[in-house]
């Protein structure tokens, strides 16, 4: 009996040695998640406490559709490119080459001031503002023909006018600017030029947004990629998060919603998981596993006895 019991104990020790670290590691990386076919990873997260505090309450998974929510509205996330640190967003009330959406229905794009240090539309993203009033802040302070309108990454309004969406509307219905002396019907600007795409404040009827992913000139506006390309960054946190993940932890933030922490299983650290004792990380799991395994050994011993 002693030999049989010793054999079982040795087997259990081997099992604990192999599987406890795996269980701990899996638990500690619980911040990574999915929505549809999109991976949600640092600095983003769906749960409170995970990710970077600059991105909290930003993403929401609704019926397997990932949504991006800021003060200007909600947008569907089409892609998150972690290598190039960029998101691709879609807005249903944004004009494209096929459809013009007027009446000020579009969200535009405005980031809260506290989020601005972490994200903004990419430099290669052009915003084409449509049907803006002559009194729009967009045209104030630019005497004569010195308007802020310009092409961005080879994309602009002159080409956009060639889209079939304009065929049934005509430029003159939106104002005299296309042929007259007033402001142009369409004005293309980079986000950095005005810092906010707010159709109400800019007194514009609508907008379109397109972005370029390569330096190759595309064949007309029908081949542009329509949507909003947003760059994100967390440079000041790279060292902290790198050390945290290298030791098996997951990057997150505390109850104050500001201070970053490294989540190490059942414990948190202000540096990395190496600073958290093994016992505090694995004790609850080890107790449960040992209790279960001892029950198994006793059952086997009793069976062999009878």
Image (spheres, helix red, strand yellow):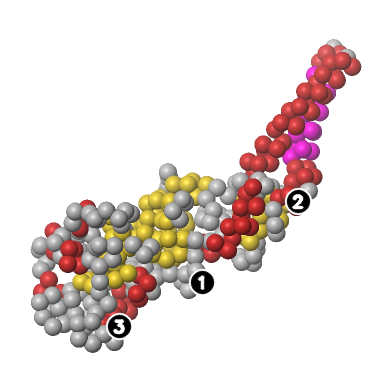
Q: Is residue 106 visible?
A: no
Q: How far is the residue under mark 3 from the one under mark 2?
A: 55 Å
Q: Residue at x 30, y 55 (%)?
A: 215
> For mark 2, what is the residue?
276
- Dots 1 and 3: beta carbons under 8 Å? no
Q: How far is the residue under mark 1 from the one under mark 3?
A: 24 Å
Name the spot of residue 32 as percent of width and height, x first.
55, 47
The answer to whether 211 is drawn above or below residue 144 in the figure is above
Classify 10 Å Cα crowding around label 1: few (below 14), some (14-19), many (20 and above): few
Tell me if 75 is positioned left or right of 135 in this view.
right
Name the spot of residue 104 as percent of width and height, x first.
27, 72
The answer to whether 138 is drawn above or below residue 228 in the figure is below
- Dots 3 and 2: beta carbons under 8 Å? no
Q: Secondary structure at mark 2?
A: loop
Mark 1 / mark 3, whichever is N-terminal: 1
- Magenta segment main secondary structure: helix
> For mark 1, what is the residue?
114
Question: Splitting the image into 4 quarters, where does residue 86 fall?
Answer: bottom left
Mark 2 / mark 1, whichever is N-terminal: 1
> For mark 3, what is the residue?
137
Q: Secondary structure at mark 1?
A: loop
Q: Is residue 180 rendered magenta in the image?
A: no
Depth check, front residue: 80 or 93: 80
Q: Is residue 43 visible?
A: yes
Q: Is residue 292 rendered magenta in the image?
A: yes
Q: Residue at x 23, y 66 (%)?
A: 156
Depth check, front residue: 251 or 305: 251
Q: Residue at x 18, y 76 (%)?
A: 184
Q: What is the span of residues highlighted in magenta in the rendered image?
A: 285-300
Q: Which numbered circle lies on residue 97?
A: none
The answer to whether 63 is drawn above or below residue 23 in the figure is below
Classify 10 Å Cα crowding around label 3: few (below 14), some (14-19), many (20 and above): some
């Amino acid at each position: 009996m002693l030999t049989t019991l010793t054999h079982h104990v040795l087997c259990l020790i081997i099992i604990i040695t192999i599987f406890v670290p795996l269980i701990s590691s899996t638990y500690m990386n619980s911040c990574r998640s999915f929505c549809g076919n999109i991976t949600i990873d640092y600095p983003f997260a769906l749960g409170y406490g995970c990710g970077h505090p600059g991105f909290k309450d930003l993403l929401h998974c609704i019926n397997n559709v990932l949504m991006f929510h800021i003060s200007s509205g909600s947008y569907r996330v089409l892609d998150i490119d972690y290598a190039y640190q960029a998101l691709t967003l879609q807005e249903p009330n944004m004009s494209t080459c096929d459809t013009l959406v007027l009446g000020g229905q579009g969200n535009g794009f405005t980031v809260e001031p506290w989020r601005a240090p972490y994200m903004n539309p990419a430099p290669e993203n052009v915003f084409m503002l449509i049907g803006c009033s002559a009194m729009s802040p967009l045209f104030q302070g630019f005497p004569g023909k010195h308007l802020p309108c310009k092409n961005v990454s080879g994309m602009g309004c002159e080409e956009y006018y060639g889209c079939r969406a304009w065929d049934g509307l005509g430029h003159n219905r939106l104002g005299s600017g296309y042929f007259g002396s007033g402001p142009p019907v369409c004005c293309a600007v980079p986000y950095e030029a005005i810092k906010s795409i707010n159709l109400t404040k800019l007194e514009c009827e609508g907008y379109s947004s397109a972005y370029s992913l390569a330096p190759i000139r595309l064949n007309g506006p029908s081949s542009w990629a329509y949507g909003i390309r947003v760059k994100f960054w967390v440079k000041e946190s790279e060292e902290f998060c790198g050390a945290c993940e290298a030791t098996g932890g997951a990057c997150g933030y505390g109850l104050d919603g500001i201070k970053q922490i490294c989540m190490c299983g059942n414990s948190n650290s202000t540096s990395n998981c190496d600073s958290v004792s093994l016992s505090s990380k694995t004790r609850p799991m080890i107790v449960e596993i040992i209790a279960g395994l001892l029950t198994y050994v006793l059952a086997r011993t009793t069976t062999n006895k009878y």
